[in-house]
């Protein structure tokens, strides 16, 4: 009798002392497993006389029930403690600041940013964006733009030529975005109002020239598009882009084979204290070439110059980016130096728009 009481009290103590589920399981096996102490006692019931069994049966079964109940209870306690520990370990403070991710660390290249800015400005004036390939035919880069064969203007462009193909045709890396004017006029009927941002290539390299650079072309073709419209558009663009109330622009006569008349445009600026400011000052800075589209160019695109006319311009994107953001040297633009990009780059979620302000 006492041995049962002793066993029960021992087992209950062991159960109480089990520190985790594995220890508890060991106690269970030792008591209720096939060869466990309680199981062995249960086995003795079979060999007893009915009277003995009547007396011992309830006691041994009672012992088993008590041990089982204690095991179940302890198991629950241990599970609760384990859950509590896990919750404490995995606690998250939702009030902590968000961790820096790629979307906050990465930077947008100033060229990409400026292309977004000028697209926003021209989109607001009703322009859409057109694109063309970097590898262009000699015909579209030069001939269709009214550069006569052998004309020195072709030389002025310091063209990169590709090896002739099987037909003997020698493609070029486009020297300007102007061939996309031709592509656009051949593909759609006027009225046309497009800007064409893109990469251009010339054999040239110094502080303000790189062999690959960027231009944005503008083209407007309609029945009455004239120089006054062009001046207004370019002025509005400069005010919006440089974020100034007023700009003074100077149209100087110039020559391009694809425009007649042609002009180069300077904008007034001040360079006091080594810093360029627009909308004031005594200096002039050239920013673009423009003109009325030459009748030969219209004809080359199947448009009747007696019915349609228009204007076009071409501007260096790298140049206006340098001016706006005070970057003195063009070459690091294309050196992929992360330190430069961290300094001059833009946060990815600062998307320029006319509503929120171009440069937030
Ligand atoms: N394509 C010229 C260049 O690369 C720039 C230019 C001048 C474009 C006059 C035009 C234009 O569309 O009308 O220097």
Image (cartoon, rainbow, N blue to C red):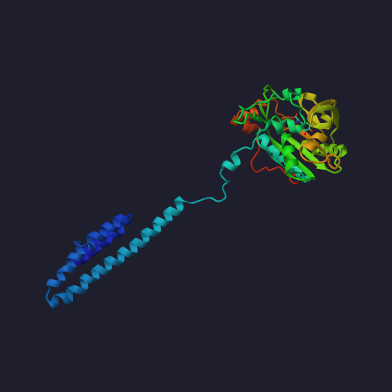
Asked if residue 358 can be seen in this view, the reply is no
- 269 vs 273, nearest the viewer: 269
Residue at image coords 86%, 30%: 250
Give the quadrant of the N terminus.
bottom left
Q: Please determine whether, in this image, residue 169 is positioned above or below residue 190.
A: above
When the figure is inspected, residue 352 is found, relative to residue 54, above or below; the finding is: above
Question: In this view of the protein, which residue sits in the foreground, 28 or 170?
Answer: 170
Q: Residue 318 placed where, x, y %?
A: 70, 31
Residue located 72% across and 25% down the image: 157
Q: Could you say where residue 267 lies in the image, as x and y percent from the top left?
A: 82, 30
Q: Quadrant of the C terminus?
A: top right
Q: Quadrant of residue 103?
A: top right
- Position of 234 with respect to 94 (left or right) is right
Q: Residue at x 37, y 61 (%)?
A: 77
Expressed as whole percent of the image width and height from the top left, the position of residue 302 reads 78, 40
The image quarter containing residue 327 is top right
Residue 164 seen in the figure = yes
How many numbered circles does the render carry? Answer: 0
Closer to us: 213 or 224? 224
Question: Image quadrant of ligand 1?
Answer: top right
Q: Position of residue 141 (x, y in %)?
A: 71, 32
* Residue lying furthest front: 167
Q: Is residue 218 above or below residue 76?
A: above
Q: Residue 188 occupies which quadrant of the picture? A: top right
């Amino acid at each position: 009798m006492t041995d049962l009481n002793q066993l029960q009290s021992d087992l209950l103590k062991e159960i109480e002392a089990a520190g985790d589920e594995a220890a508890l399981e060991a106690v269970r096996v030792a008591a209720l497993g096939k060869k466990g102490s309680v199981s062995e006692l249960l086995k003795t019931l079979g060999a007893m006389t009915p009277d003995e069994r009547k007396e011992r049966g309830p006691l041994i079964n009672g012992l088993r029930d008590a041990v089982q109940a204690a095991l179940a209870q302890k198991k629950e306690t241990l599970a609760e403690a384990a859950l509590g520990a896990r919750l404490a370990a995995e606690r998250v403070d939702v009030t902590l600041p968000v961790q820096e991710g790629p979307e906050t660390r990465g930077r947008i290249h100033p060229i990409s940013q400026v292309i977004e800015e000028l697209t926003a400005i021209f989109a607001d004036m009703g322009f859409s964006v057109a694109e063309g390939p970097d590898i262009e035919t000699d015909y579209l880069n030069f001939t269709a733009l009214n550069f006569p064969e052998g004309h020195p203007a072709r030389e002025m462009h310091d063209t990169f030529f590709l090896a002739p193909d099987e037909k003997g045709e020698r493609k070029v890396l486009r020297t300007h975005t102007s061939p996309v004017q031709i592509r656009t006029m051949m593909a759609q009927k006027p009225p046309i109002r497009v800007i064409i941002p893109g990469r251009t290539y010339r054999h040239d390299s110094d502080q303000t020239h790189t062999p690959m650079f960027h231009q944005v072309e503008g083209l407007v073709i309609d029945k009455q598009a004239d120089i006054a419209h062009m001046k207004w558009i370019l002025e509005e663009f400069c005010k919006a882009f440089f974020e100034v109330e007023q700009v003074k622009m100077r149209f100087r006569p110039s020559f391009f084979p694809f425009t007649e008349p042609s002009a180069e445009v300077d904008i007034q600026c001040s360079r006091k204290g080594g810093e360029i400011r627009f909308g004031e000052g005594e200096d002039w800075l050239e920013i673009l070439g423009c003109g009325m589209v030459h009748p030969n160019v219209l004809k080359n695109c199947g448009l009747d110059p007696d019915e349609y006319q228009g204007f076009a311009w071409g501007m260096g994107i790298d140049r206006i980016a340098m001016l706006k953001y005070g970057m003195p040297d063009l070459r690091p633009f294309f050196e992929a130096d992360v330190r430069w990009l961290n300094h001059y780059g833009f946060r990815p979620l600062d998307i320029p728009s006319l509503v929120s302000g171009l440069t937030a």
